[in-house]
Image (cartoon, coloured by chain):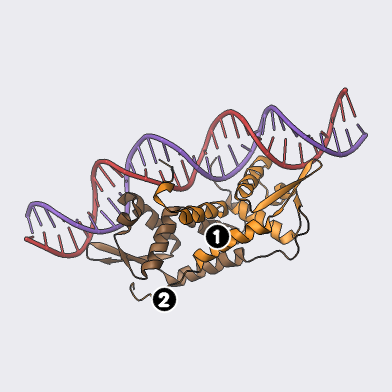
Chain colours: A brown, B orange, C purple, D red
Amino acid sequence: MGITKTDKFNEEQNTLATIAKVFAHPARIAILQQLFKLNTCVCGDLVVEIGLAQATISQHLKELKNLGIIKGNIEGTSVCYCINVEVWENTKQIFLKFLNQDIENNSCCI
Amino acid sequence: MGITKTDKFNEEQNTLATIAKVFAHPARIAILQQLFKLNTCVCGDLVVEIGLAQATISQHLKELKNLGIIKGNIEGTSVCYCINVEVWENTKQIFLKFLNQDIENNSCCI
DNA sequence: TTGTTACATTGCAATATTACGATTAATATT
DNA sequence: AATATTAATCGTAATATTGCAATGTAACAA
């Protein structure tokens, strides 16, 4: 089958899974880290930096853009990418809420 | 190809992607939420609760177990699952560190 | 105009994931 | 012992993801 049955789950669960899916590839993690690290727009050199084919990087950038956490500005023949801070914060909060759920007492399993 | 080129990335990036991949399915999110919510072992009724086939749930549980964030205790014919708090905390910290990286100034893109 | 550069898109092959029926293994129950 | 219950595993089909060569597109440079 290969198709996820999203109708079995609530919106929150599907949203969390969608966000996680975007984080679920080292190239996309690397792109985000690079954008954070440089603290400025990155124009093109992501391909050189990461070492995958240009088409592949472009595809990963597309997925990050689809989630909205990065944005691209066209500057002449090149495109500059950076974090979309608002969307990033929003996305982060959703994920933090999930990660920060804690167990009060965990005396059941050994 | 379909195969991720992990050798192009550092350990941290691959680890983050691996963790995210486990979170990247609503059924696994639902299982974790259930385990947190009940605050006790969940014995079997995950199949009923989530509404996927037993084999499917078992497969998702396996992936959560592979990451180590849940553990299962055999009790007679059934198995009780719960969060492995130590591993969960560890995993959480790795992810928090990634999520909490922030930009000091973001004046580049419009 | 012609070429060049930078990136997106398309098309395709290889591999991974999701889902489930069927089977197996282990323990309980009768 | 025979049967039932529970969950893991196997096998398989459908779909998704990854990666890249080739191509398309838009802006600039000569």
Q: Distance of mark 2 from mark 1, alpha carbons?
A: 28 Å
Q: Quadrant of the C terminus of chain B?
A: bottom left
Residue A15: which numbered mark, if any?
A: 1
CA neighbours of label 1 inside 10 A, class few (<14), some (14 to 19), many (20+): some
Image point (65%, 65%), residue name: A101
Disc 1, SS: helix
Disc 2, SS: loop
Image point (60%, 63%), residue name: A99
Side of C6 relative to B2 (left or right): left
Side of C10 relative to B89 (left or right): left
Residue at mark 2: B104
Question: Identity of the amino acid at label 2?
Answer: Glu
Q: Position of residue A6 (x, y in %)?
A: 58, 52
Q: Position of residue A74 (x, y in %)?
A: 28, 65
Q: Position of residue A81 (x, y in %)?
A: 34, 65
CA neighbours of label 2 inside 10 A, class few (<14), some (14 to 19), many (20+): few
Disc 1: which chain? A
